[in-house]
Image (cartoon, grey):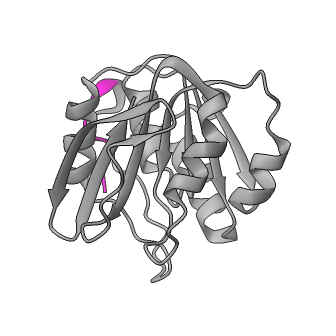
Amino acid sequence: MRIIGGIHRGRLIDRVGKESTRETADMVRQAVFNMLGGSVFGSVLDLFAGSGAYGLEAISRGAQLAVFVDKDRDAIKTIERNASLLKCQSQVSIHFMDYQSYLKTLNESVKFDIIFLDPPYQMDVYIDLINVLRSHLNPEGMIVCESTKSLILPETILDLDKIKEKTYGIKRISIYQ
């Protein structure tokens, strides 16, 4: 697995290497960042982070901060190792906890420019998460949902509209703004 664009383009990053962690292929990540416009600014939240590929790609493309949340110890170790490989430890905040516990810790003043939601496919939590995370999204921010292609999310959730949607193999990417 590698970083696709930005200052770390072409650098290899480690996978978690567990069956319970579904890594996003380079091609799909590249397509997602193309859909986002390429460059990233501000801060990002990588919920269900796995190897941290989405957040690390965002840092490579200009994000100042990436917040990673995962409940798997091996995933956390992989994110730490990958941040070290890219020498971007000062730009990451890593939380070893489940997503519900993390959401309870969020202060109302915490805002993100991009939120990546890539839960295990059997967890249909996208709408609930967007309802909770909407207040933590900057006005021009976006929420990227990676799901199984059979799951079709609504066109509008709260005041966010689905602005882009594409399928790649078994995955569906839906972007809300």
Image x and y of residue 97, in percent: 76, 60
Residue at figure coordinates x 46%, y 58% from the top left: 118
**Residue 64 shows in this picture:** no
In the image, is residue 52 above or below residue 170?
Answer: above
Q: Quadrant of the N terminus?
A: bottom left
2 is within the stretch colored magenta? yes
Please state the horizontal and vertical placement of residue 69, each as a whole percent of the image: 65, 52
Of the pair 28 and 86, the residue shown nearer to us: 28
Principal SS element in the magenta part? loop
Q: Is residue 15 visible?
A: yes
- Give the left or right position of residue 127, taking residue 170 as reference: right
Residue 39 as seen in the image, left or right of residue 159? left
Q: Residue at x 50, y 56 (%)?
A: 126
At 52% from the left and 61% from the top, the residue drawn is 50
Q: Is residue 25 magenta?
A: no
* Relative horizontal placement of residue 171, taking residue 115 as reference (left or right): left
Residue 19 lies in quadrant:
bottom left
Where 5 falls versus 53 (above or below)?
Answer: above
Seen from the viewer's position, the closer of residues 49 and 105 is 105
What segment carries the magenta color? 1-6
- Quadrant containing the C terminus is top left
Q: Position of residue 62 (x, y in %)?
A: 42, 19
